[in-house]
Image (cartoon, helix red, strand yellow):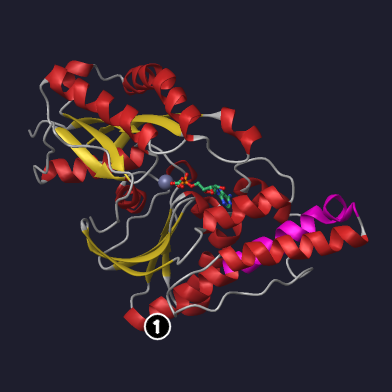
Amino acid sequence: MIKPVYILAIESSCDDTSASVICNTKILSNVIANQDVHSKYGGVVPELASRAHQQNIVPVVQQALEQAGVSKKNLSAIAFTKGPGLMGSLLVGTSFAKSLALGLQIPLIDVNHMQAHILAHFIKEEGNKTPPFPFLCLTISGGHTQIVKISNYFEMEILGETIDDAVGEAFDKSAKILGLPYPGGPLIDKYAKLGNPKAYSFTKPKVGDLDFSFSGLKTGILYFIQKQQRINPNFVEENLIDICASIQFTIVEILMEKLKNAVKKTNIKHIAIAGGVSANSEIRSRLLQAEKHFGWTTYIPKFEYTTDNAAMIAITGYLKYLNNNYSDVSVTAQARLKVTE
Ligand code: KG4
Ligand code: ZN
């Protein structure tokens, strides 16, 4: 019998410290420590994130191993997020992973965070459907908005991307305008469920067929709110659910329009979503509708694999392990890294 492969994976690219243990393609544990410290600042404060990672990393790794029932000596390799992300945050995970791999004398595997968001679809688990190659992935997070064509595990091509803000930023900045704490995306989603998506209309950006732009929308929302508040200072409080529903509707309309363009251009109808914003209920339901209306097959990750998590680093690490694609100890964190690198 072939010996099972156990990999410990570490994710620390932004403001979540996470560790996961995988046995081949099956996740045994996925522990995530969120950092509440940022909410009152309206965004992630890099210095505080880095410090919190340093405090969290040992207990989070310990818990991941315990939950998995795997001891360090049984690990086959250590995988970690190399980038993209905040340098101070990435360095904590990178140095921890390096020291552990060196100490245990096992291979070290660096993982591209953006590839990992996409490859989370290959975790074998009930409720997680695996797409066939080639497929398209709409990668939507706090830092990225891209349509990627995936021809094989590590053969990816960016078909279109944002020219300014990421879609997660559009959610978070809109939420900030409405006085909601960071990260505002999930809150907009929550209030939007109760409101009328057609209550207000916002102008959609005009960019290339497969590209995105969200900075104009954010400014449009800001001016609209300021104008309404001059007439009624309680405008936001009185209409919060309708404002949220209308913002969310506009953003999801933009995403769906671009996906339709990409399908037309490539004739690929296997459509996946990945990244934190793929937790959004409206994009999820619109994709399910597209199955019926346009004959697409859609791949929507389980909630726990949408926002940053180490399970996605673990599956990517496993796929690299199968190819003996290990890193040298001289590997360094990279704040900027494309999904194709
Ligand atoms: O992938 P992720 O956890 O971190 C990055 O790599 O950026 O994505 C975080 C982003 C944040 O902007 C957050 O507001 C957004 O995902 N987000 C959502 C939802 N859940 C998380 N946006 C809209 N609706 C949601 N339900
Ligand atoms: Zn992410």
Give the magenta range: 233-252
Residue at 14 percent of width and 22 percent of height: 102
Q: Nearer the viewer, residue 179 or 219?
A: 219
Is 248 within the magenta? yes
Residue at 68 percent of width and 48 percent of height: 176
Residue at 63 percent of width and 40 percent of height: 42
Whether disc 1's CB lies below 8 Å from ligand 1 is answered no
Query: Does the magenta stretch mainly form a helix, a strand or a loop?
Result: helix
Q: Residue 7, located in which quarter of the rendered image?
A: top left
Q: Dividing the image into 4 quarters, which one contains the C terminus?
A: bottom left
Q: Is residue 285 above or below residue 87?
A: below
Residue 112 place in picture, x, y as percent: 28, 47
Is 32 within the magenta? no
Q: What's under tag 1, amino acid-wise?
A: Lys
Residue 125 place in picture, x, y as percent: 36, 43
Q: Residue 327, located in which quarter of the rendered image?
A: top left
Residue 34 place in picture, x, y as percent: 51, 30
Q: Classify residue 171 as left or right of residue 137.
A: right
Q: Classify residue 43 as left or right of residue 93.
A: right
Q: Classify residue 52 as left or right of residue 154.
A: right
Q: Dividing the image into 4 quarters, which one contains the N terminus?
A: top left
Q: Nearer the viewer, residue 288 or 42?
A: 42
Q: Is residue 116 above or below residue 259?
A: above
Residue, disc 1: 264
Residue 259 place in picture, x, y as percent: 45, 73
Q: Is residue 143 above or below residue 162?
A: above
